Image (cartoon, coloured by chain):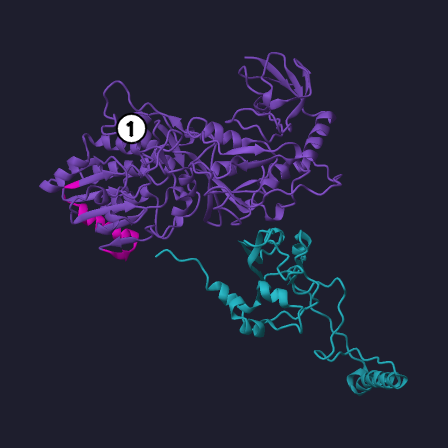
Amino acid sequence: MPLVKVNGIAVEVPPGTNMIEAAKKVGVEIPHYCYHPHLSVAGNCRMCLVDVEAGGRGPDIACNMAATEGLAIRTDTPKVTQMRKSVMEFLLVNHPLDCPICDQSGECRLQDYYMEYGQHDSRLADAKMGKGKRQDIGDQIVLDAERCVQCSRCVRFSDEVTGTGELRLFNRSNQTQIGIFPGVRLSHQYQGNLADICPVGALTLKDFRFKKRVWWLKESESVCGGCATGCNILVHHQENEVYRFTPRRNDEVNKSWICDQGRLSYKDVTSLKRLTGAKVDGQRAELPEAANAAALLLKGAKVGVVFGAKATTEANWAAVKLVRARLPNARAYVIEGNDPDAFTYQDEILVDSDKTPNRFGAALTASQLGSVGDAEALKAALASGEVDALLVLHDDVVGRLGVATPKALVYVGTFKNATSSAAAVVLPAAHYIEQPGTWINRQGRVQRLRKTVAPAGDSVADYAAVDAIGRAFGGAVIPEMPAAIFQELAAGVKALNGLTLKGLGHGGQLITLFAPSPGVDQPGQAAPAK
Amino acid sequence: MSDVTPAIKKRKLNTSESIYLVEVLKGMAITMGHVIKNIIGELKGQSTFDTMEYPEVRKPVNDRFKGAHRLTTRPDGKYKCVACMCCSTACPAKCISIVAGEDADDPIEKFPVRFDIDMLRCIYCGFCVEACPKDAIRMDTRIYEINAFSRQDMIHTRDYMRDLMAGDKPEAEQWYRENPQHSPEGFLGEVPPVIP
């Protein structure tokens, strides 16, 4: 591993690492526009110019400078500051003073670097070059060519990530402007990322247009629940209201991207399809009251528990504990496949065909009860009367299987569907961004959910809803704190042994799902590894 | 330190004070002195009265007096405000609420759909005026009688603040009665649907 020096601080980095990343390691930020860790190096913004002390000839751009033994750069010399000032002056020559109406302001690199390296007295004598403003280039994106600094990140994104290549830099010199080929519109499912990677306000999101100034928004970490990929996201919210989802970098899962479907799924949080109150026989009820009714229905019945691939692992674990403590003869079922109203799109980049975020979590926990039945087994059991009461976590069992509804159906879920309307007792579960918990994605990565906003209406965390039934039976089945539940879960499920909630960190922990030795924690009906 | 409050010693009145009459005459002498001074002043043509007959006569305020806010307009009559929310960010009392909208016909793409200031919360610091990059909000109206019979009428809305200096300064209550679509109640009616 080559040893390089940044401002005199020595750091060892893998060979080939560029100097922006090397400098980041020692806490030195090198300003840049065109460089992006998940795109190829273009080197055209020139903002990352640094002085080379040894091991090369400078000044040179840090993004295209591979770490080699003995390389030493400096970013703190007056020369470097002067270079940055000059680059900023060029970039701002044709940049309009749009900040008051620009959605990027507050998270704009031009603003940030201008405060440090701006030529605060303009030397510009000529009028600014006017270019096309407010161009509708796609379903999600508005293009303002005037604001562009020609970093070409979006061009590289559409060439390298989506492979669609709709965007290009047209014309030359100061006439250069970003544009889309005539007659073409952005049509891929990753348009929102263009707004994210654009360091300035040239590409902005239609959905977020003029909604909120970004400096008011708070960011909280979470995981997208749209499909089995489990993209890491940041939830942007203010005063308990969610305004957008943006991708959170996780090199192992979603790099820096997220699909538009997932990005816009923040709207589900306030959807009219949310279940916000407990119901008993279609009538609104208080949660403990509904839990009592659920307990009465399940007590002594031939219960089938449908473990939920949309529920947290904690909720599924709570169901396991409930069965062990109170429903000794219950059978476990995990039903594969997606809900009938699920979005059917899938691709090789991020979007999985499996639209459930926690298939493995459900399978792992369900297998703790011995044999796990599938959809056919459940149908047969219901037909023959072997099961006459159901506890369903999130799954739209009725809508998917068209099974004859047993009279005793208890539904714990977030959204209204055929099952919730058929259920005798409905317990409202919080949306996944409103509660703590864990999900296991398609790789077998345990990822952590966090409570970012307060749950809507009377809804509670899904494990708490299951626990409420346990309390109605006479005692809580799981601890109250998420960390304690996870501790119990990690001790109880072999594949999760040794994990702690805190230890999952920001990026999650990979577990071995398909151990070669046959064990009780083998996911019985789980989908094959991808 | 003693926790007993010391008693206040009263001064004993002397003989002339204790019969009061002398003191009454002293007071009347001061009053009559002012009366005579004012009559002489009035005869000389220079009023020495300190009382003003409000509201017919108003005290002139300083040029820098910060009165009720108004919103300025461009020559074409549209708001100068582009809903950048700098004022509501700067506001220490959090009394400005703005909803931005898109103007499809205007090269300045953004404009305020709603611009409400809760005058009951406002502390008249003038930070909003300082923060505004467009000179869209000013406090130069010199209006200091900001009052209404209800809390809702104390919310000054976008069009009211635009018309504040046009013609004779309208009373908020009357103005809202004539323009019900811009009244604060009109806004409160537009709350997003509640999840059933």
Give the letter of the cyan chain: B
Closest to the observer, A294 or B136: B136
- Report the quarter where the N terminus of chain A lies: top right
Residue A121: percent from left, percent from top: 75, 40
Range of the magenta residues? A282-303
Residue B164: percent from left, percent from top: 64, 68
Q: What residue is shown with label 1?
A: A493
Residue B167: percent from left, percent from top: 67, 72
Closest to the observer, A263 or A515: A263
Residue A458: percent from left, percent from top: 35, 52
The residue depicted at 44 percent of the width and 43 percent of the height is A452
Q: Quick check: is A291 in the magenta stretch?
A: yes
Name which quarter of the figure residue A513 lies in.
top left
From this viewpoint, is residue A468 visible?
Answer: no
Give the letter of the purple chain: A
Chain under label 1?
Answer: A
